[in-house]
Image (cartoon, rainbow, N blue to C red):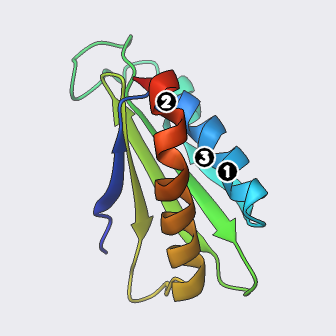
C-alpha cells in the first residue's frame, strides 16, 4: 500500500481534520471519518505513545473515506504529531482509488492551503 504524504502542514492534526473536512464538503465531496487513533486508544489503559513514551502526546491518525461522483471512495489519511500534520491518499491494489476523486482532493486542498497558512503557522 502506498501512503506517501502529498501535503505537510504546521498544524495539529485535529485542527487540520476540521479544516480538511470543511474544504472537501465545499468542493462537493462527502468525507466520512472511519478511524480516530485517540478514540481507539481510550479503551487501552497501558498504551504509551511509541514516539514520546507517554500517554500525554499529540500523536494522531485519522482515516477519512471521501466520496465523489463514483461509488468508490478515496481513503484520506491524516497523521500528525508535534504540531504537524501529513496528509496522504492511500493507494492499494485491493482498494483502487478513483483517480478523478484523488486528483480533486489533492488539487483542492493544495490550492486552498496558502490562504490558511497564517492561521496554522
Look at mark 2 in the image and give the residue it sits on: 41
Q: What secondary structure is marked by label 3?
A: helix
The structure residue drawn at horizontal position 42% and vertical position 69%, both measured from the top left corner, is: 90
- Pointer 1 or 2: first along the chain: 1
Look at mark 1 in the image and give the residue it sits on: 23
12 sits to left or right of 49: right
Q: Nearer the viewer, residue 52 or 42?
A: 52
Q: Which label sits on residue 20?
A: 3
42 sits to left or right of 7: right
Q: Nearer the viewer, residue 27 or 64?
A: 27
Q: Tell me how far mark 1 sits from mark 2, CA to CA.
A: 28 Å
- Pointer 3 or 2: first along the chain: 3
Q: Tell me how far mark 3 sits from mark 1, CA to CA.
A: 5 Å
Dot in front, 1 or 2: 1
The structure residue drawn at horizontal position 60% and vertical position 56%, both measured from the top left corner, is: 64
Q: What secondary structure is marked by label 1?
A: helix
Please say if 92 is above or below 58: below
**Quadrant holding the C terminus:** top left
Q: Which label sits on residue 45?
A: none
Q: Are marks 3 and 1 in contact (CB under 8 Å)?
A: yes
Residue 22: percent from left, percent from top: 72, 45
Amino acid at each position: 500500500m502506498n501512503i506517501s504524504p502529498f501535503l505537510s502542514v504546521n498544524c495539529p492534526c485535529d485542527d487540520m481534520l476540521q479544516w480538511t473536512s470543511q474544504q472537501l464538503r465545499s468542493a462537493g465531496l462527502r468525507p466520512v471519518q472511519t478511524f480516530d487513533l485517540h478514540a481507539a486508544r481510550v479503551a487501552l489503559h497501558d498504551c504509551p505513545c511509541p514516539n514520546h513514551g507517554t500517554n500525554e502526546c499529540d500523536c494522531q491518525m485519522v482515516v477519512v473515506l471521501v466520496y465523489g461522483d463514483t461509488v468508490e471512495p478515496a481513503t484520506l489519511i491524516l497523521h500528525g504529531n508535534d504540531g504537524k500534520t501529513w496528509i496522504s491518499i492511500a493507494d492499494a491494489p485491493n482498494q483502487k482509488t478513483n483517480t478523478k476523486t484523488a486528483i480533486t482532493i489533492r488539487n483542492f486542498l493544495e490550492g486552498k492551503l496558502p490562504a490558511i497558512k497564517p492561521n496554522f503557522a
